[in-house]
Image (cartoon, helix red, strand yellow):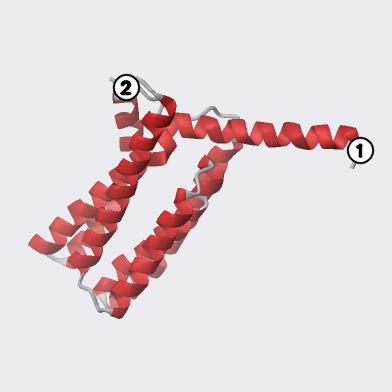
Amino acid sequence: MTEKSSSESLNKLETFRQAQTAMRNGYANGSIGIIVSGLIWLTSAIIAYQYSAPKAIWVLFIGGMFIYPLSMLISKLIGLAGTHNKGNELGNLAMEGTIWMIMCIPLAFGLSLQQVEWFFQAMLLIIGGRYLTFNTIYGNKIYWVLGAILGLSAYLLYNFKAQSFETLLTGSFIEISFGLFMFISFRRDNKTTLK
């Protein structure tokens, strides 16, 4: 490797790390989105318990569409950017992961026609798989742990024939717990002054 190509590689790596830092700073390690998602899972669990699992599917589906806007709003209210600059390629990766997740939802819905509980367990797998890419986006390996725990939970809940309420509550607990941990870590590491 020549000195010039070595220097270019180091510059690209530094640019990549700067992009990850910008994503971490803009979204508090992604913690706000995880907490909002967990709260939507919790709301869906309440609907499943009080009304029915099919209604809970719609709450999870419609609520999921509001994760990003609610996360941006909450981020701005507490003094964070809640966004990234337009030139950050990692923002594109986040959007591509979102599109992949949306494309998987019909598979989960198809499973619900066989057994309604399978929708929620499939969504745990889908969301867990999406979180694996967040390690690249945010430069934080805890996303591998979060994705693995969601995937393992989906598998165990399926094997134990868990009801919709139990699956939704599990998803909520995992996401809210990880989200809070990541938010606290972000504040500690950055000593950010929030409103």
- Which quarter of the rendered picture does the C terminus lie within? top left
Residue 165 drawn at (x, y percent): 18, 65
Instruction: State left or right for residue 141 relative to residue 112.
Output: right
Residue 139 drawn at (x, y percent): 54, 42
Q: Do we see residue 98 in this rendering?
A: no
Residue 108 falls in which quadrant of the image?
A: bottom left
Cα–Cα span, label 1 and label 2: 46 Å
Which residue is situated farthest in the left direction here? Answer: 50
Give the residue displayed 43% in from the left and 38% down from the top. 29
In the rendered view, tell whether residue 5 sits above or below residue 170: above
Using the image as rendered, state which of residue 177 and residue 105 is in the foreground: 177
Which residue is situated farthest in the front direction here? Answer: 188
Task: Name the residue that disc number 1 marks.
Answer: 2
Using the image as rendered, state which of residue 50 and residue 137 is in the foreground: 137
- How many marks on residues? 2
Task: Name the residue that disc number 2 marks.
Answer: 194
